[in-house]
Image (cartoon, rainbow, N blue to C red):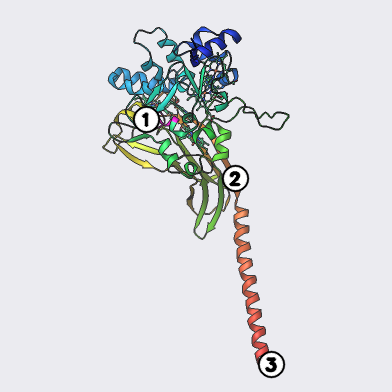
Amino acid sequence: MVRRISPIARAALFALLFTPWPAPLLAQTYQSAAVCATCHIEIHRTWQGSQHATAFTDPAFRLPYDRLRRDNPRKTFTCEQCHNPMRFLLAQDDPRAAVFSREGVTCDFCHSVSSVDARGPFPRYRMKPGVRYGPRPEHSGKGPHVTKSSRLHITSEFCAGCHEFRNEHGVAILSTTSEWEKSFYRGTGVHCQFCHLPELFDARFIDGKKKKGPIDHAMVGGRSRERLARAIPIRTRLVLAGKEVRVVVSVKNELVGHATPTGIPTHRLRLAATLFDAAGNALGRREETFERVVGDGTGKALTRPEEIFVSAREVLKDTRLQPKETREVRFSFPAGKEAPATASVALTYEIPTPDTAPTLRYIEIPVANQVVTAEAGWARGKAVVFAAAAILAFLAWLLFRKAAKNRA
Ligand code: HEC
Ligand code: HEC
Ligand code: HEC
Ligand code: HEC
Ligand code: HEC
């Protein structure tokens, strides 16, 4: 009697022969990240520090969530679809539920996904427990567990099930995926993974072939100062125009694959310009924010995350920078008695702290700082005048010569 060995049996055999991990990894069920950590050490380390790992536990989520649970408990069901997704995959009385809640968006959630209906009703993800889907065809069938390669895992569609959300009033609360879809990145095949899941080590083998090393799962966004500085450059000019002093700043969304800021409409970018005289006294200060603000339907802005998700009925303002957009911001100051000497410009990424009392406070991440001196502004102005005068003189000389020749 000849029977084909099923992939699971084959993997079990492999596991029994070659690894100390026969049982848990081959059961058709989900495992804790702690199990994966024994082999995928680097990946686990980077994931552990990510917002995904703390999606259900970190205070920034927990405080709004607990307020909602107190005031409107039926609505918390939606939050958990993305912040505690394992809950819906386990039986009600499963003792592992508590373990998985502490792991937020865990390894076996993402790696058991077989398909997604990114804009459909919840649950949007279809799962195959016991199968670990990964990006690399050459690893299909390898490892002590059942491993399958999946094209879905290297596309934006995969992230979209959680990174795109309209509330029941039809207001887009999370639109990162559709912002990306409208951008040039989609056309050029640059998916979320290209920027958010880079290789950890760029190791090369002796034969020159590039090894595909483990992938960084930290998935950092606006919390990384270095990333922000590279992605959103600024250029400042100080222009003296008669009765007015203008600080002109061009801010470019150079390398962000979607609007910036994206995601939950509580994060914002703030651009501030301060004008100083030669003695260092501030002569004036102006500000501009790039943000999306949603309202309750009567024009009142909502700032608490739980209200934003549940009660937003309108978009009051959207001044975010779209992919590749350059925005020129002009701050004008009246030219006073004191001549301006320098202008200092700062771009800051701001994330509200979890507490909301008595007013909102922000964690401030510096993105860019520039100081320009008025001399540069004056000098440029002078240079332009000088060049214009020189050209005029040359033209006059030409005319004069021509007239002289004609006379001769
Ligand atoms: C006993 C060691 C071990 C444990 C524990 C383990 N894996 Fe693996 N895993 C491997 C090996 C070996 C491979 C084959 C690819 C390789 O050599 O990197 C692999 C491959 C994978 C792949 C496919 C990678 C690709 O390149 O496409 C995924 C996804 C994966 N594992 C996820 C997990 C998850 C999730 C867990 C925890 C539930 C886990 N693994 C636990 C050893 C392990
Ligand atoms: C199961 C749902 C889920 C999936 C799938 C998912 N995410 Fe997330 N992601 C979240 C949640 C929830 C947060 C916010 C966690 C928090 O701050 O409480 C988050 C946060 C992030 C952040 C950090 C945001 C910040 O404020 O710093 C980045 C970057 C990110 N995700 C990228 C991705 C990418 C890229 C993918 C696809 C490869 C992906 N996510 C797939 C749910 C998900
Ligand atoms: C938010 C979803 C998400 C979570 C959570 C997640 N992964 Fe991944 N993982 C991915 C995606 C997407 C890729 C493919 C990235 C690519 O190739 O561009 C990937 C790639 C991998 C790979 C193959 C690449 C490699 O480095 O060998 C392994 C193995 C892996 N993940 C294991 C894990 C483990 C272990 C954990 C938990 C500690 C984990 N993942 C958590 C989405 C996730
Ligand atoms: C071309 C590179 C690039 C691509 C493609 C890209 N991102 Fe980003 N992403 C960034 C950069 C840079 C930042 C940091 C700046 C910011 O937060 O605006 C960021 C920030 C984020 C954040 C954090 C927002 C916050 O509030 O802090 C999330 C979440 C995110 N991206 C998700 C995604 C998802 C989902 C996709 C795919 C649909 C994607 N990104 C595609 C570069 C990219
Ligand atoms: C469709 C999936 C989804 C749903 C539903 C969802 N969230 Fe989120 N949530 C996310 C993602 C993704 C982020 C990361 C946003 C970003 O920065 O781009 C996030 C971020 C947050 C943050 C900011 C956390 C931080 O670290 O700054 C809070 C607070 C939050 N969500 C609360 C809630 C509450 C409360 C609910 C339920 C009313 C909810 N979310 C429903 C996906 C979701």
Name the image quarter holding residue 289.
top left
| 10 Å crowding of disc 3: few (<14), some (14-19), many (20+) | few
Q: What segment is highlighted magenta in the picture?
A: 158-165
Q: Is mark 3 on a helix, strand or loop?
A: loop
In the rendered view of the protein, which quadrant contains the C terminus?
bottom right
Q: Which mark is residue 211?
A: none
* Residue 174 point in image, percent of width and height: 39, 33
Which residue occupies the foreground of this view, 13 or 219?
Answer: 13
CA distance for labels 3 and 1: 87 Å
The residue at label 1 has a CB less than 8 Å from ligand 5: no
Q: Which mark is residue 371?
A: 2
The residue identified by callout 3 is 408
Identify the residue at image location x=62%, y=28%.
Answer: 212
Identify the residue at image location x=46%, y=15%.
Answer: 130
The residue identified by callout 1 is 117
Q: Is mark 2 on a helix, strand or loop?
A: strand
Q: Is mark 1 on a helix, strand or loop?
A: loop
Give the residue type at disc 3.
Answer: Ala
Q: Which mark is in front, 2 or 3?
A: 3
Labelled pair 3, 1 in contact (Cβ < 8 Å): no
Say which label, 3 or 1, has the lower sequence index: 1
* Residue 290 point in image, percent of width and height: 44, 41
CA distance for labels 2 and 3: 58 Å
Which residue occupies the foreground of this view, 404 or 244?
Answer: 404
- Vertical placement of 106 versus 241: above or below? above
